Amino acid sequence: MTRNDGPSRRRFLQTTGALGAAAIAGGAEGVSAEEMQAYGDGSRPAPPEADVETILSNMSVEEKIGQMIQANVSTVDADQVESLFTDYHVGSLLTGSAYPPSRDPVELAKGINGLQEYAIGEGNGVPFVYGLDTVHGNVTVDGSTAFPHHIAMGATRDPDLMETAAKHTGDSAAAVGAHWGFAPTSGIARDPRWGRFYETLSEDPHLAGELGAAAVRGLQDGASEHSGVAASVKHFAAYSQPQNGNDRSPARIPVRDLVENHLVPHHMGIKAEPLTVMINSGSVNGIPAHASSWLLTDVLRDRMGFEGLAVSDWNDFYRMVEMHDYAPDLKTAVKEGVNAGVDMAMLSDMEHVDGFYTALLDLVKAGDVPKSRIDEAAERVLRLKAKLGLFADPYADPTKAPDVVGGARDAAREAVHESLTLLKNEGGALPLADTDHIVLAGPNVDNVRTQCGGWTVGWQGLHEDDAKPWATTIADGMTSHTAGRVTVHETGYTYNRLSDDEWSLSAETREAIVRDAERADRVVLVLGEGPYAEGYGNTDELALPDAQRELVDAVADLDTTVVGVLVAGRPRGTSETLAKLDAFVMAYYPGSAGGAVADVLYGDADPGGRLAFRWPDGVGQVPNYYNQYHPAKDNADALFDFGAGESYTDFSFSNLSVSPSSIANAAKTGTATASVTVTNTGDRTGTALAEAFYTEAYGSVQYPRRKRLGSEKIELAPGRSKRVTVEFPLAALAVVPPVAYRNRRVMLPWEVLVVAFLPVLGHVLATWWLTTAVATYLSVAALALVLVVELDVFTTVRMTDGVAAFVVVVTTMAVAGLWAVVQWLSDRSLGTTLVYVSRPVTPAVDTASLHALMWDFVAATACGVVGAALFVLYFQRRVRADERFAAEVAR
Ligand code: NOJ
């Protein structure tokens, strides 16, 4: 994988300059009013009208393939960039890995406009769509707002807050000229060894789904008017549980687990109608997700009904060859991936762009990738652009950036208050009193880079001397709260594996901290991890690094109360450390508003977070998610359970009721509610979380020991009560039964009528010159079929769709035959019929009528057989999918 080691503003300036873009030398500060006004003055080339069919029909195969390319501009040299549009006709550009070509918001917007002018004027006229990473804010540019990372947002249990944060993110990304944000991450947290644990929203599928859907709504709000961007539910699917905890290593996940857990948040996100989906870089059960037509077509399109664009992750066609050892060469990988359903390839540089483009063009020429597939993919790209309003107005307004970027500061602070999770609080260690003398020490006390984590103006986090989001640190918050009473000790920083992993506690620092701590009321140690992203964040260690444990040991035996605050992306710290702390707060990566941690420590805000994952006591307890099967015992094998987190006040929960109290027909009931009365029994206002769970004692397959159904968070004054109701769909209780999907009844009423009609058609044709009661026949046949279907015969006898189609047709033929005989009998006199029956050797039969009858029956049969064949073909795709699904479940 090629990564550039940082953006080059100079290069971007050259690039945009080379393209004759608006003059931007001098950067944001130097942008003149006239330059700003240049936007919208009508001098720019206009894109074609948004008639997608016409645009598509005017495109060559080469241009359609170009639409399927997303090129990373951060690595493309100025002298090459034109060729992206003139030689490769690329449909999309991206800022890869949070390295934009410029970190100045205005400069970026103007630069993207410049490129757009070139693409439209000198390329094929079709505007490109520009994407960047927005997993915790529009955090690729200077001065932006970094919200807490996803795993902290899971702790808030607050979809509205998530939507507000995402709305700002979308606005901000649009203001810097982008049209597409690569978020939310909808995979579930399963393994804290994995370097992307913090990018997930929760280990609970429904919580991750609720918040992910909120993020989609927020990001896309206003997207067609350039205040908002397309969202990308990622990484589809089952990326988050690599078997050995290492990023992009293979996942082996039983399909029951896939369906009940991993796919759920993706499906919930897709119901919020994201315009795009990004595909999982890893392999699932032996097949790279990018080559899995089961995942990308059967599940994503046919079952989930996704109609938007499926983009690959970074160079993933190449990974099929170089990493997964799955395809022998790039051409095979491209063939498999595009045919499986990948619509757009995200590519790191010119070399990769060229490789993909050439391979796909060859494949189309050789007929190995059908032209119809290229049309479908290119059309999805064009439809995305149309929905984003790019044909109507492809240019950003750079004047907006300064007002928008860096906003939503209250929401950022609220997210810190709502996510901070108080996991231990003995002897009233917290909240701190304003009069307390505090010693504040540890690696993450005063470090913007650390508190923002990875994917923040850089892939592995901030560069030390670089652009930054706006930020207040924990030390800022503490010292501004009680100036003069906080002594800050810098111990050295915790970095990630790209640099020295950990500082060592020198004797000097240790002595200074101990000396001050002995005289203080409280010691607050801010421990944890540095920033990291993807594989660089993998770890086989959940205990804190040695130097940090030494720091805890240094103050643990003093008489002073010790409060631990963890700034980290996962459950770092084991019982050995926890036992030595009087209080312990999980702060995650709080982002820009690190200072708001102090509001909670001093009790100005209640710690509102509840763990969105189960906290194992070291790697030996991994995997350890809360919704496993029995016989794991609650709490006995983890340090903190899912949902753990205290308030500074106490709550009681009483009078639980469920409505309806019993259910006769689950399919017709839809939703149910659980209600409980929450009372603040303490002496201060606080935040309570009423969270509903469900389980079953036995069943046809094991049931998770608990399943979260929903939650409601409320703030209550002391002594106050509130009745809280959580509504949940009964479908949320479902598990995949042992023979799932094999015995589904999938014929729809109109399909039944079509099947019924085919033999009728034959009958009608045959009886054109006969006098049969066609109308009567029609109603009898239709009635029989409706009864067969409504009585659920297919489900009961466990037929696949193809067999069911045959049964329907044969039943209809039987009815047709029967009716023909009845007709014939009724046409003959009773006497003649009796003669025929009693004297078969010399029948007194009207042979013309008998021939007509036979003709009638043969025609009905022929139509029935043709109908059956057509229906088998029609169902074949779904039957195949069902069989594959059943085979997967049976594994
Ligand atoms: C690779 C990451 O897996 C993905 O999450 C990200 O959006 C892209 N690179 C773009 O930076």
Image (cartoon, helix red, strand yellow):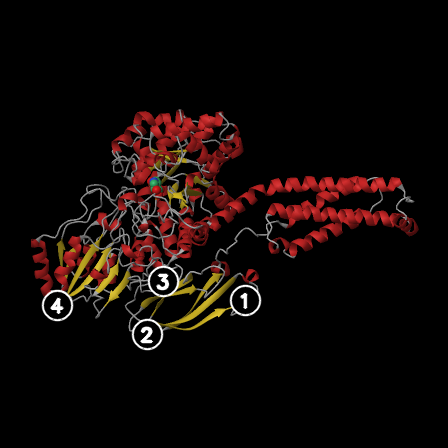
Observer-nearest of 498 and 884: 884
Identity, as a three-letter code, of the amino acid under mark 3:
Ala
Q: Nearer the viewer, mark 2 or mark 3?
A: 3
> Horizontal placement of 537 versus 720: left or right?
left
Number of numbered discs on residues: 4
Q: Which residue is mark 4?
A: 559
Kindly report which numbered mark, 4 or 3, lies closer to the viewer in this rendering.
Answer: 3
CA separation, marks 1 and 4?
A: 58 Å
* Mark 2 or mark 3, earlier in chain: 3
**From this viewpoint, is residue 485 visible?**
no
In the image, residue 385 sits, relative to residue 569, either above or below, namely above
Proximity of marks 3 and 1: CB atoms separated by less than 8 Å: no
The mark lying in front, picked from 3 and 1, is: 3
Q: Mark 2 or mark 4, which has the lower sequence index?
A: 4
Question: How far is disc 3 from disc 1 in space, using C-alphas?
Answer: 29 Å
> Observer-nearest residue: 772 or 208?
772
Q: Are marks 2 and 4 in contact (CB under 8 Å)?
A: no
Left or right, 786 with reference to 476: right
Q: First in sequence: mark 1 or mark 4?
A: 4
In depth, the one of 864 and 654 nearer the eye is 864
Say whether disc 1 or disc 2 marks the residue closer to the N-terminus.
1
Residue type at mark 2 is Thr
**Residue 389 against residue 531 in the figure, above or below:** above
The answer to which image quadrant residue 489 occupies is bottom left
Task: Kindly identify which residue carries mark 2.
Answer: 681
Disc 1, SS: loop
Label 4 – label 3 distance at C-alpha:
38 Å
At x 44% / y 64%, what residue is drawn?
Answer: 695
